[in-house]
Amino acid sequence: MSTTIGELNEKSLHAALKAWVAQPGDALETPLDGYVIDIIHGEQLIEIQTGGFTPLKSKLMALLPQHPVRIVFPVAQEKWIVRLTPDGEVLGRRKSPKRGEVLDVFAPLVSIARHVMHPHLSLEVLLIREEERRVPHARHGWRRGGWIIHERCLLEVLRGQRFETPAAFAALLPPNLPQPFTTADLATALHRPRGFAGKMAYCLREMDILIPAGRRGRSVLYMTR
């Protein structure tokens, strides 16, 4: 079996999502303008991004002027954590109490928020069920009690939500938000930490969805356009 560009270093989740998104006739792992594109679907370039968006910045700057680009980002609505021995034997499997949602895209989106203004860029969030496989590692596993993530595996794609324009992101603002509001107000309405609310407000400001509306003490006030 032949191996295409990038396949040797491809992680399980990325490979599974690429197979799920790709349609018959699409070109996979294809060089274009100095970059390798995950999927070329007609004229559209599709990038599967399972981690942060920072590595995409230079690629987007180079490709967006000439090509429509869709970023596909998975969020684990349901996650199973599996612990394995170094030989791959299963030691245990448990369901994580954390449940992801579409809002989680704002954390990685901070690094490319301004690019969302480009008419060639769209973004699709896929809510998935995934299995996170962990193996012991004495030196690098201190954050997880001596365990590191070995790979993430796709179990099921539950649903997707596509954002074709910046205005589509405005629908993620909670309806009970006062006008004007601070990031503390936004955090309360979302039931999220203020740090997350700050990232969301930054992204929406970069997209021209929010505009500054003065200050309340040390806090910036925002209003929707």
Image (cartoon, rainbow, N blue to C red):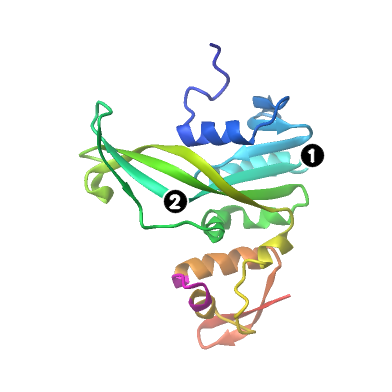
Q: Dot 2 lies on which element?
A: strand
Where is residue 126? Give x, y as percent. Answer: 58, 48
| Looking at the image, residue 63 lies above or below residue 99 | above
Q: Quadrant of residue 163?
A: bottom right
User: Mark 1 is on which residue type?
Assistant: Gln
Residue 153 part of the magenta segment = no
| Looking at the image, residue 13 lies above or below residue 71 | above
The residue tagged 2 is 78
Give, as a single range, the part of the protein colored magenta. Answer: 188-194
Where is residue 44? Give x, y as percent. Answer: 75, 37
Asked whether residue 57 is in view, the answer is no
Query: Callout 1 environment at 10 Å: few (<14), some (14 to 19), or many (20+)?
Result: few
Where is residue 31? Give x, y as percent. Answer: 66, 25
Is 126 left or right of 84, judged from the image as shown? right
Residue at 67% from the left image edge and 57% from the top image edge? 114
Query: Callout 2 environment at 10 Å: few (<14), some (14 to 19), or many (20+)?
Result: many
Q: Residue furthest bottom?
A: 217
Q: Dot 1 lies on which element?
A: loop
Mark linked to residue 9: none
Residue at 51% from the left image edge and 72% from the top image edge? 190
Cα distance in 3D space between marks 2 and 1: 37 Å
Is 224 left or right of 143, judged from the image as shown? right
Q: Quadrant of residue 83?
A: top left
Asked whether residue 89 is in view, the answer is yes
The residue tagged 1 is 66
Residue at 36% from the left image edge and 57% from the top image edge? 97
| Looking at the image, residue 6 lies above or below residue 2 | below
Q: Specify which label sits upstream in the sequence, 2 or 1.
A: 1
Residue at 34% from the left image edge and 45% from the top image edge? 81
